[in-house]
């Protein structure tokens, strides 16, 4: 089985700060990977590198076997656009466009790309808003929504271009505790539908339940990786336990 995401010796520095130190991992189709670890360990930078929101300083990223960057050398603009279009990203702070309605947020990218006719795009945005339980919010502006609703809109938006990989950067960290459940339910449903996902999260119970594998990042490295049972259950993983106990 060929891997969906193949990262080799990924390296990223900001000046003299080595944020990613030769990170290597693979993600298989349909796999859900939860990334945990202390603040500043490089989780966001790793995720953002996959969708070219950060340029790495060394190493390789292959998506579906296609090189986004190989040994530190980036593919051309067209190839980068094609490769990153197969991935959707959901951010901590939703990043919705405030001047567009919910439906406008979903339809902006597909309308700009003009790959589908407008009727097909509208049918798809309606379908995805139903999927995240917000069919009745199509015509409202983001400012009218709760944080949990905004994040569900952001997830629906990320699905509009039919990605086969979804990346989540702390999707519930900006939410009041009572609103995290509705967002986690949507992510769990996507996992049941076999969406390939990498989820950076501080929700340990969620990571334990939904992930096939857990990466524990520390100081720019994947310090430990394994099944949730291995990561959360083994007394051998001292560094991980220390972090989990702090949380
Ligand atoms: N644009 C930047 N310029 C300089 N340093 C940066 C930049 N972006 C991130 N860093 C640094 O890189 C390190 C890793 O940051 P990153 O956001 O990837 O960590 P993280 O594990 O996601 O942390 P958190 O859980 O707090 O979001 C931090 O020390 C951060 O200060």
Image (cartoon, grey):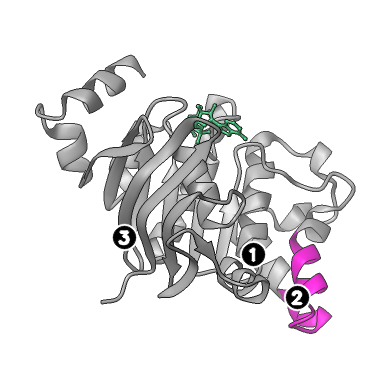
* Residue annotated with mark 2: 121
- 183 on left or right of 247: right
Q: Earlier in the sequence, mark 2 or mark 1?
A: 2
Note whether residue 38 is visible: yes
3D distance between C-alphas at marks 2 and 3: 33 Å
Q: Which is nearer the eye, 138 or 59?
A: 59
- 218 on left or right of 130: left
Q: Earlier in the sequence, mark 1 or mark 3?
A: 3
Q: Quadrant of the C terminus?
A: top left
Q: Residue at x 75, y 71 (%)?
A: 110
Magenta region, residue range: 106-123
Res 31 quadrant in image: bottom left
Circle 2 or circle 1, nearest the eye: 2
Q: Residue at x 39, y 25 (%)?
A: 38
Q: Secondary structure at mark 3?
A: strand
Q: Which mark is residue 61?
A: none
Residue 108 is inside the magenta segment: yes
Q: Are marks 1 and 3 in contact (CB under 8 Å)?
A: no
Q: Which mark is residue 128?
A: 1
């Amino acid at each position: 089985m060929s891997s969906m995401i193949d990262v080799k010796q990924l390296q990223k520095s900001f000046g003299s700060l080595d944020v990613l130190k030769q990170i290597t991992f693979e993600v298989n189709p349909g796999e859900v990977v939860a990334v945990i670890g202390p603040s500043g360990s490089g989780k966001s930078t790793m995720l953002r590198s996959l969708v070219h929101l950060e340029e790495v300083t060394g190493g390789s990223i292959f998506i579906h076997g296609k090189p986004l960057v190989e040994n530190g050398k980036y593919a051309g603009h067209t190839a980068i656009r094609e490769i990153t279009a197969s991935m959707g990203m959901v951010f901590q702070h939703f990043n919705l466009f405030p001047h567009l309605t919910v439906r406008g947020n979903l339809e902006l990218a597909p309308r700009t790309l003009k790959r589908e006719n407008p009727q097909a795009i509208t049918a798809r945005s309606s379908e995805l808003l139903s999927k995240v339980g917000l069919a009745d919010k199509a015509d409202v502006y983001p400012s009218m929504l709760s944080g949990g609703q905004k994040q569900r809109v952001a997830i629906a938006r990320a699905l509009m271009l039919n990605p086969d990989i979804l990346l989540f950067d702390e999707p519930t960290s900006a939410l009041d505790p009572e609103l995290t459940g509705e967002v986690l339910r949507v992510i769990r449903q996507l996992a049941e539908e076999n969406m390939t996902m990498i989820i950076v999260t501080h929700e340990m119970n969620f990571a334990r339940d939904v992930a096939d594998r857990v990466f524990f990042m520390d100081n720019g490295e994947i310090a430990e990786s394994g099944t949730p049972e291995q990561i959360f259950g083994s007394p051998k993983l001292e560094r991980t336990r220390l972090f989990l106990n702090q949380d």
